[in-house]
Image (cartoon, helix red, strand yellow):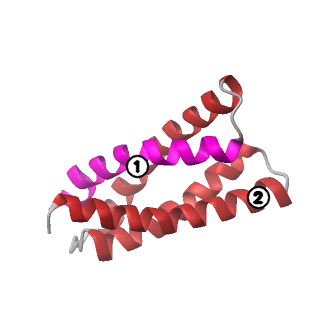
């Protein structure tokens, strides 16, 4: 399967993750009144774990036997993505005065390119 189709699959998985991320973020921020960055981080963690499983099985069809190592690589890349995500949200909300959820959507779109490339080259190329 070519890289383009893997990216499309990665994007579909990412959409499911985005639903999980936004739902948990909204619940924690709006209903439980947690800090927006803590809520964002919790939403991210749940989505990243779901995305790992779906990408392992469907997108990259990984047969790596060392699942903890593969998951750690995926999660480490996702954490870097989270830092980029939070930085973009901060810049767009605090400096650009955008709505939090609009800023979050923009951050997700930008960070997907980092996440896909790093996972393609590192996580799911592990032998």
At x 62% / y 58%, what residue is drawn?
A: 43
Instruction: Give the CA separation, mark 2 to mark 1.
Output: 23 Å
The residue under label 2 is 28
Q: Look at the numbered disc 2 and give the secondary structure of its residue.
A: helix
Q: Look at the numbered disc 1 and give the secondary structure of its residue.
A: helix
Q: Is residue 126 visible?
A: no
Determine crowd level at label 1: few under 14, some 14-19, many 20+ residues with C-alpha closer than 10 A: some
Part of the protein shown in magenta: 100-127
Please name the predominant secondary structure of the magenta segment in the image. Answer: helix
Is 118 colored magenta in this rendering? yes
In front: mark 2 or mark 1? 1
Residue 71 location, quadrant: bottom left
Judge by depth and name the residue closer to the eye, 34 or 3. 3
Residue 99 horizontal/vertical position (percent): 71, 40
Judge by depth and name the residue closer to the eye, 111 or 98. 98
The quarter in which the C terminus is drawn is bottom left
The residue under label 1 is 112
Residue 54 location, quadrant: bottom left
At x 30% / y 76%, what residue is drawn?
A: 58
């Amino acid at each position: 399967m070519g890289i383009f189709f893997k990216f499309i699959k990665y994007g579909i998985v990412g959409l499911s993750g985005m639903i999980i991320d936004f739902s948990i973020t909204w619940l924690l921020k709006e209903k439980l009144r947690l800090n927006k960055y803590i809520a964002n981080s919790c939403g991210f963690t749940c989505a990243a774990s779901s995305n790992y499983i779906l990408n392992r099985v469907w997108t990259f069809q990984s047969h790596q036997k060392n699942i903890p190592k593969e998951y750690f690589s995926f999660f480490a890349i996702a954490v870097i993505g989270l830092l980029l995500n939070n930085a973009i949200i901060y810049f767009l909300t605090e400096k650009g005065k955008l709505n939090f959820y609009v800023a979050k959507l923009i951050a997700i779109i930008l960070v997907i390119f980092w996440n896909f490339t790093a996972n393609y080259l590192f996580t799911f190329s592990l032998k």
